[in-house]
Image: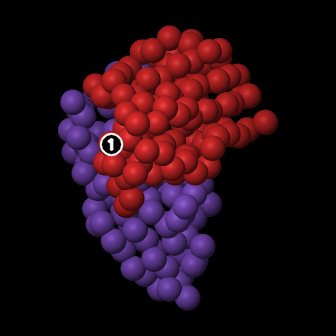
Chain colours: A red, B purple
Amino acid sequence: DTEVTQTPKHLVMGMTNKKSLKCEQHMGHRAMYWYKQKAKKPPELMFVYSYEKLSINESVPSRFSPECPNSSLLNLHLHALQPEDSALYLCASSQVSASMHNEQFFGPGTRLTVL
Amino acid sequence: GENVEQHPSTLSVQEGDSAVIKCTYSDSASNYFPWYKQELGKRPQLIIDIRSNVGEKKDQRIAVTLNKTAKHFSLHITETQPEDSAVYFCAAGGTSYGKLTFGQGTILTVHP
């Protein structure tokens, strides 16, 4: 299995809702990532998990809360979002090497709309 | 932190022509330079990457060149086809584990 899967594909939520995005990979990768991508813009890194531990947090607002229950799963919990948080949320995964970067495989994304 | 600039922002070519996209980076510690292709409504997909110990890499119609001294790298697509139409992103990765900094993207349109 060489795919990263994400659910749901689309999500519409109000500013007072709580929702979660889910990501799964079965490639044995030990690093997983959350990116935010606005239309016609590059992906922006939000969080990096390495061996299920948070290793990079790009100063993301606390209304976004990541969780890595195991090496195959990555969640992003959403609470009290703002309309400007509407975007495509991409999950990615990669192998881990001590001294070099590895290819990041992206999931299809969740299209989030905050009303 | 790292800053990656990408040019041009849009590129229009005729089928069969070559296309060149250029990126510059600021952090001399960066050592990994991937290129991603993203079709409308799809996920970014890696098309080629290069590491700092290599000056050039080819894969069929696609090639990437790296000039470490000048801190720039380029994507070359030969014999372009309409299915090459997409947004292309360059990126740079350095010593900060796992972090890629992306360029702003190039919208490539190949006219039949």
- Residue in view at x 51 percent, y 72 percent: B85
For the question of whether residue A108 can be seen, the reply is: no
Residue lying farthest right? A1
Foreground residue among B85 and B77: B85
Q: Which amino acid does label 1 sit on?
A: Gln
Residue B27: image location, x then y, percent: 23, 33
Residue B58: image location, x then y, percent: 55, 53
The vertical placement of A109 against A94, above or below, is: below
From the image, which quarter does the C terminus of chain B lie in? Answer: bottom right
Which structural element holds mark 1?
A: loop
For the question of whether residue A57 can be seen, the reply is: yes
Q: Mark 1 points at which residue?
A: A82
Question: Is A99 left, or right, of B42 in this rendering?
Answer: left
- Residue in view at x 51 percent, y 57 percent: B37
- Residue in view at x 55 percent, y 70 percent: B84
Residue B89: image location, x then y, percent: 41, 53
Residues packed near mark 1 inside 10 Å, few (<14), some (14 to 19) or many (20 plus)? some
From the image, which quarter does the N terminus of chain B lie in? Answer: top left
Foreground residue among A107 and B73: A107
Question: Is A59 left, or right, of A67 in this rendering?
Answer: left
